[in-house]
Amino acid sequence: MARGISLASQLLFAAFFIIHTADADIKLKMSGSPLQIAFSENVALECLLLDYSGSLDSETLGVLWKFGEADIISYAAGRFNKHWDNVDMSKEDLLRKNMTLHLRNVSVWHEGTYTCKVFIVPAHKVSGSITLIISARPFVTVSSPESVEVGREASLLCKVNGYYGSDIQIQWIRVKNDRTEFISANVCQGRPVVNLDGRYNVSVEAVVEPVQEDIGSQYACLVKHRSFSPNYIEKANFTVKEQKDDTSAHIVIGIVIGCLITLILSVIFYVYYRGFYEVPPKLSEIIKPPIVLHNVPVTLICPINFFKPRGITVSWCKKSKEGQVMEIVKLHRHTVLSEEIAENAQRKYEHSVDEIGFPDATYSMNSKLLFKPTIEEDDDFEYCCKVMHMSLREPLEIKVQLDIKVRPVIGDIICNTVNPELGKPLELMCKIHSFYPQPITVKWLKATEVLPESKIWNTYDYEDKMKYEVCSQYSLAPTLEDEKKKFVCRVEHESLSQPMQQEYTLPSLAIAPEVGTIWCSSSEPEVGRDLTLSCAVEKYFPRQIQVEWYRGHTRIDKEHVCNVERFEHRAFYMTSSVTIKPTRDDHCTEFRIEVCHSTISTKPIAQTFILKFPGLPNFLPFCLDPLQPVYGQPLALKCSVEGFDSKEFEVSWVQDGEELTKGVQNSGPFNTPVGYKIESVLNIMVTARNFEKEIIFKVHNNCTKQTFQHRLMLPLSAVSPEISEITLSKDVPRLGEITLSCTARGFSPGNIKVLWSRGWTDCRSSDFTQNLVLEENGLYSLTTELVTLLVKEDVQYSCEICHHQTKTVQARKYIVKCS
C-alpha cells in the first residue's frame, strides 16, 4: 500500500483478500465491453452495485480499480489513495452504490482491461471488468502536381498522421463515371513512425502514368480506420491533360535547320539547366490538429514538395502577440546525403523530417515540429516555417496561428437537499472548471428535453489567470413525473469535438406528513374510565416515520399506543391512538403527539390536547414574563384557575416537594359566570436549580377536600462550564505537600464529574475536594483541589471535568517541576 494509508484502510484491504470467493447475492453492472473512446477525451467507466439491500458505510466499504495488474485508485476506511493523477471517484456516489471511475484525457497508454473490485466487510466481495479501446482519428493530407500530360509520370503522395490503433489501410483510387478503380502498381507504403504520444504516422506514394482514357478521372486517397465510419476519402487536386503535338507539319529546309542548330542547342542546354537541374520547392499549408490542447503534444507539419537539387535550409520560428520573433530550430541539408546540420535553439521542441525521392530526381519532404503547447507561451502566437533553396532568390515562408484550448472538467451534479420533497423547490448544481477560452455553453436537459434557460443561473469566475470556471444551477419544484428522471448538465466548448455531460437521477420524492388535530373518544371524560386520544397523520413518504405520545413531559409507553397504517395514491396514511385511564391529576394536563419524518427533517411536528373533566375547576395556561427565562434574571409565573362553587379553596406553589412561599401574590377569589376564580403570581430568580425541575401550581378545595395540580417545566437550556488553568497554591508546603486547584464556572445543571490524574495514574476521589456553589448569575461554579506529595522529579498532573448534560469533556494540565 502507498505511504499515508491509515491502519483502518490496511485492515479493510486485508479483509478483502481473506474473502476468497465472490458473493453471488450481489452483482456489479459494468459499462458495455469493449468500450470505445476517442483519444484525449474523458470517459466514465461505469460500475454499479446491484442486489445489495443494506446501506453502505465508509468504514466497512472498500473499492479497488486496477489496470491489468496495476492499482489505479482505491477507497477504504473513508479515504482515497490515487496512483494515477487523471482518475477520480465520488465519495457520495460510492455510498449510493455507484463505484464509477472517471478517467480524464485518455491516451493510447490507457488502452486495456480495467477491473472494479468491491468488498463490504465482513462477507461480501464482487468484481467486474471493462476493456477500453482508444482510437485516434488520423489527419490525412495529399500532395501532387496540379496536372500531368498523357504518357508522362506523376507522383501522388498521401500523408496519414496522428492515428491509433495501428491497424490501417491506405489506398490510392481512380474514379471516373462513378466507377472506382484501385491503383496497385507502382505503390510504395512507408514504415509507420511512432510519435512520443504513441500515435502513428505513415505515407503512401503512388507513381502513375495516365493514358488517354484517364482524362477526366479524379484521384483520391482512401483511408480505412476504426475511427472512420464510413471510410475517409481525401481527393487530390490533380488533372490529366491531352498530350501536346510537338511534331511539325512541314519539312524544314535543311539550310534553316543548320543555321538554327546552334541556337536550339543553346536553348536546350538552358532549359535543361533551369528546368531539370534546379526546381524550386512548393509549400503547402502547415498541417495542424483541428483542436490544439494545453500541455498535450502536438505536431506541426510543413509539406515541402518537388524541389531539386536536394540541398535545402528549413527553419521554424514563432512570433508573439507583441511582435517579438524567436527562432526555434534550423536545418541545413546539403546535396550530399550524409551532410545535415540541425540547430535547435529551444529544448521544448523536437524537429524531424520525412523525405521521399522521385524518379525525376525531385524531392519532397515534411518538416515536423513536435512540442507541448501552453496557454502562456503559445496561445495566439504565430508559427512560421521558412524554406531557402538555391533555386530561390528569397526564402519561402508559410504561417499558422495557434489557438490553445483547455478542455473543461465537469464535476458531479449536486442537489442542495439529500432527500428532495414533492413540490418543494430545489437546486441542482454542476461545477465546470479548468477550461479555456471563456466562451462556453451550458444546457440542462430532462432526459432528452432541453429545459428553459429562465431557470438556469451561470456564475463565472477565474480559476487562475489563464483558466475559467462556471457554476451552473438549475432550479425546479419536482413533481411526480420527475421521479427517477435523469437530469443532464451538457457542456459545449470549442475544445470539445462533441459535448460532454454529467447526469443526475432524481430519487423518489419525499412527502412531508400532515398532522391533524387530536380528538377524544368521549366528549365528557371521566376520572378512572378508559379514554382514547387519536390523531391522523396523512400523506407522507417514504414510510420511515416515528410517532411518540407524551403526558406532560413524560413519554407514554408504546404498549398503550396503537398505529394503523395504509398506503394509497403513492403516500402513506396513519391513525395513531393512545388509550389511558385518567386520574384527577390529569385534569388540565397537556397530552402531545410528536411526529418525526427523519427523511425530511429531524424537527418533529407536534399537536397538543388539554384534557379537562366536566365539573372540575379549569386551569388557564401559564403565562411567563419574560417569555424566555434567563439565568440570573427575575421571572414572573402567572396561573389562573376558575370554576369553583364556593370561595373555600387555597392555592400554593411547589418545587422538589418544597412549598414556595416567597414572591407569591394572589388575587381573588372573584365571582365569574363560570364560578369563582383566583389568580396567582410566583416571582422567582431563575437559577440552575430550576433546570428540568417541575413547578406545580396546587389548588385545594376545602369543601370537597380535593386537590388539583397544574404543572410547568421552565424552558431552560443547558450551559457547559468554562474551565480555568490549574494553579499551584502559593502557601508554604506542609510536610512536603502541595495543593493544585482548578475551577469550572458558569454551568447548568450542576451534575458534573471531576477526575484528577498523576501521569498515567488516576487519583482517588478521596485525594481531592469539590466545592459546588450557585453564583449570583444563576449558574453553578465548582472549585476542586488536589493535595499531593512533592516528589524529586517533574510530574504532570491533569484535571478532567465532564459535564453530562452538554456532553462536554475538558482537561487542563500542569507540570510540577522538581526544585
Image (tube, rainbow, N blue to C red):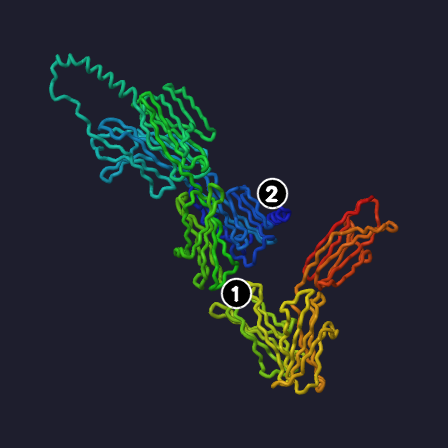
Does residue 737 appear in this view?
A: yes
Residue 94 placement, left or right of 807: left
Residue 381 sits in quarter: top left
Residue 1: which disc? 2
Disc 1: CA contacts within 10 A as few (<14), some (14-19) or many (>=20): some
Q: Position of residue 199 (x, y in %)?
A: 43, 36
Residue 223 placement, left or right of 666: left
Residue at 24% in and 29% down = 148
Q: Secondary structure at mark 2?
A: loop
Does residue 69 appear in this view?
A: no
Q: Earlier in the sequence, mark 2 or mark 1?
A: 2
- Which tag is nearer the camera, tag 2 or tag 1? 1
Residue 48 placement, left or right of 337: right
Quadrant position of the N terminus in the picture: top right
Residue 542: which disc? 1
**Is 155 above or below relative to 513?**
above
In the image shown, does 698 or 121 lie closer to the viewer?
698
**Is 115 above or below relative to 310?**
below
Residue 209 sits in quarter: top left
